[in-house]
Image (spheres, rainbow, N blue to C red):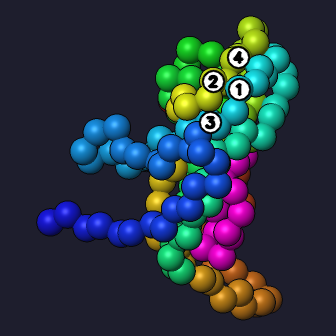
């Protein structure tokens, strides 16, 4: 059974495109640039999408890299996933970072990232003197090995 949610979108640029799914069943909707710029190797830039969105309470929009741009050009979303909270009503912008060896041209109307809608829960923090013991305890980075 297909579940749908309506996300209200306001275009603030005549060149803006609404986020859209490329294929049925995709998790992420494509986000499109409304500007042209070049991101040099090692550089990062905020790229405008020309839209504002209203995410329902209890959800967030996650901005994630496009795998093709990442694999082919070394360009990624810097704070991946970027979070758009339900209370935010400003322009959706994407922080792109060029980790590749060549300049990357951002073109108007081209896909730059993807947007995934995810359910979130509010948590209540409770201070305690001790935490319960687990088999892992405080073993962290690299503790499970690579094989």
**Callout 3: 10 Å neighbours few (<14), some, many (20+)?**
many
Q: Outermost residue toward the right?
A: 43
Which of these two is toward me, 103 or 90? 90
Residue 16 location, x and y as percent?
57, 44
- For the residues bearing labels 1 and 2, Cβ distance under 8 angstroms: yes
Q: Which residues are magenta?
A: 77-93
Q: Nearest to the eye among marks 3 and 4: give it.
A: 3
Tag 1 or tag 4, which sits nearer the N-term? 1
* Residue identified by numbered label 1: 36
| Quadrant showing the N terminus | bottom left
Tag 2 or tag 1, which sits nearer the N-term? 1
Mark 1 to mark 2: distance in Å?
Answer: 5 Å
Residue 107 location, x and y as percent?
63, 24
Residue 69 location, x and y as percent?
56, 23
Mark 4 to mark 2: distance in Å?
Answer: 10 Å
**Callout 4: 10 Å neighbours few (<14), some, many (20+)?**
many
Residue visible at 56% across and 70% down? 54
Residue visible at 70% across and 48% down? 93
Task: Answer whether residue 124 is visible to the viewer in this image.
Answer: yes
Q: Does the segment drawn in magenta span residue 92?
A: yes
Mark 1 to mark 3: distance in Å?
Answer: 8 Å
- For the residues bearing labels 3 and 2, Cβ distance under 8 angstroms: yes
* Residue identified by numbered label 4: 104
Whether residue 110 sits left or right of residue 23 in the image: it is right
Tell me the tag on residue 33.
3
Q: Does the segment drawn in magenta span residue 111?
A: no
Task: Answer whether residue 144 is visible to the viewer in this image.
Answer: no
């Amino acid at each position: 059974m297909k579940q749908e949610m309506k996300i209200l979108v306001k275009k603030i640029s005549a060149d803006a495109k609404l986020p859209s799914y490329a294929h049925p069943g995709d998790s992420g909707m494509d986000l499109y640039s409304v500007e042209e710029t070049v991101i040099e190797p090692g550089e990062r830039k905020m790229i405008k999408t020309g839209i504002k969105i209203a995410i329902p309470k209890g959800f967030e929009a996650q901005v994630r890299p496009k795998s093709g741009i990442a694999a082919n050009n070394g360009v990624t979303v810097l704070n991946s996933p970027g979070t758009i909270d339900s209370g935010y009503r400003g322009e959706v912008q994407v922080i792109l970072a060029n980790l590749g060896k060549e300049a990357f041209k951002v073109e108007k109307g081209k896909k730059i990232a993807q947007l995934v809608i995810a359910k979130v829960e509010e948590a209540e923090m409770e201070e305690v003197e001790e935490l319960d013991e687990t088999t892992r305890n405080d073993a962290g980075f690299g503790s499970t090995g690579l094989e």
